[in-house]
Amino acid sequence: MANGSSYDPDVHSDRFSDLIPVEITAPGWYPLHLLYFEKQVTSTLELYWLKPDGDGQLDFVPEEAFAHLPGQ
């Protein structure tokens, strides 16, 4: 499959994907595109980050960190 991902035909419980490091060096809005698949009506999508002023632990990205541009 594209981008080095592999096909996983098994049904399994939710699990973390590999970390994808992204360094943001300036505040602002950045585009984020997710390709997400659901199988067997089990859906979970969680996005974590290292807070800029945090303790080095991964935490949920808060909803106020997201915006939607209509038509995109």
Image (cartoon, helix red, strand yellow):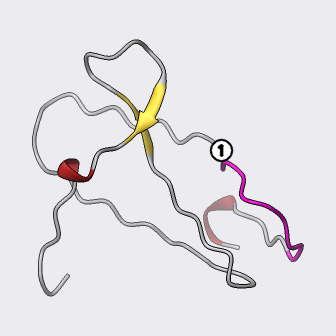
Tell which of 72 and 48 is nearer to you.
48
- Assess whether residue 13 is covered by the magenta stretch: yes
Q: Secondary structure at mark 1?
A: loop
Q: Position of residue 7 (x, y in %)?
A: 80, 72
Q: Position of residue 65 (x, y in %)?
A: 21, 48
Which is the main secondary structure of the residues drawn in magenta? Answer: loop
Query: In the rendered image, which quarter contains the C terminus?
Result: bottom left
Per the rendered image, the range of residues in magenta is: 9-17
- Assess whether residue 14 is covered by the magenta stretch: yes
Query: In the rendered image, which quarter contains the N terminus?
Result: bottom right
Q: Is residue 58 above or below residue 22?
A: above
The mark total stands at 1
Q: Residue at the location (35% across, 43% down)? A: 61
Tell which of 5 and 12 is nearer to you.
12
Q: Position of residue 67 (x, y in %)?
A: 16, 62
Q: Within 10 angstroms of label 1, few (less than 14), some, or many (20 or more) residues?
A: few
Q: Residue at the location (44% across, 15% down)? A: 56
Q: Quadrant of residue 34?
A: bottom left
Q: Position of residue 39 (x, y in %)?
A: 72, 81
Tell which of 29 and 61 is nearer to you.
61
Q: Residue at the location (84% across, 65% down)? A: 12
Which residue carries the number 1 mark?
A: 18
Q: Is residue 70 left or right of residue 12?
A: left
Q: Is residue 66 left or right of residue 14?
A: left
Q: Residue at the location (65% across, 44% down)? A: 18
Q: Amino acid at mark 1?
A: Asp
